[in-house]
Image: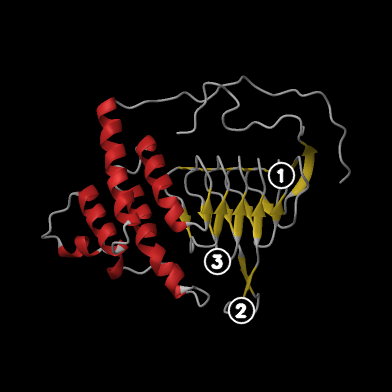
Amino acid sequence: MADLPHSPIQLIGEKFPYTRIEVSAEAEKLYDEWIARLFARISSGEDRNDICRDTLSELYGVPRGNAILNAQFDPRNITLEPEYYGDCDMKRFLERKPLLWLWYMFDKSPAGLNLDFGFKFRRALAPFIFKKVGKNFKCFPFVEFTFGYNLEIGDDVVFHRWVFIDDRFTVKIGSHTSLSDYVNVYSHTHDINCRYYVSNLPTVIGNNCRVTYHSTVLAGTKMADNSMLGALGLLTRETRPDSVYVGIPAKKVKDKDPRHHCRPGDHPDETIT
């Protein structure tokens, strides 16, 4: 599809910047100190399985007498799907498994839907799980990953609820990019005749991209900078910069004006927490 001529910038709708919400000073101090203690334990080289078990026991407040439930707090007693994959680097995955389990179970705990606390908690774990993570990473509840160790994240990236990142192979997500609720990003495909034959392909989402509700980015594709994938879209090929793609398979339908990039922090009242 030929590029469309740029028209003057005309933003649709009324601007509603995010409101900065603050909890009480007492709660802020409690949360920050708790996360600092957790960060210190992880950084110390202590067995991460023990850290996960102790932290989940504290979060859930389950009496020690409940043997079955308490067993689930220790990652050594549970299995996760990536462990079954033949291409799993077990050494690297087992280093991250306790923190992935802690992340997932935190989200299901009474604390998991406390957004401000949750943002800080996940941001503290992220450097120990991902290959790379930039500043101001913001992750809502119920996001899951495959291995964690193949994922690279830029600055000011936002993952909304129920995002799934399949990082069986390299997945790179650029700065100022947002993944909306129920987005799936893949880095592997299966042979149509035999599911045991897998192709791992690098997947790249560029800077200032928007991957919107319930859309899917397939393995080996690349979203160019400042491009957008519309709701329910299925991306099967590389996009062009400053473009909007929609549909199954996704096709270009319009240009975005490259002169206007709406990024976190553009508005003085908007703060990434």
Which quarter shows the C terminus? Answer: top left
Number of marks drawn: 3
Residue at figure coordinates x 27%, y 31% from the top left: 27
Identify the element where label 3 is drawn.
loop
Residue at 45%, 42% (x, y): give it.
140
Q: Give the secondary structure at mark 1.
A: loop
Mark 1: few/some/many CA within 10 Å (<14, 14-19, 20+) = many
Task: Give amino acid for label 3.
Answer: Arg
Q: Which mark is first along the chain, 1 or 2?
A: 2
In the image as oriented, which residue stretches furthest toward the top? 14
| Rendered position, 242 above or below 18 | below
Can you identify the residue that label 1 sits on? 225
Instruction: Quickly name the residue at label 2.
Output: 197
Q: Secondary structure at mark 2?
A: loop
Between marks 2 and 1, how big is the CA–CA gap?
A: 32 Å
The residue wearing badge 3 is 168
Q: Nearer the viewer, residue 83 or 229?
A: 83
Of 128 and 202, which appears nearest the observer?
128
Q: Position of residue 166 (x, y in %)?
A: 54, 61
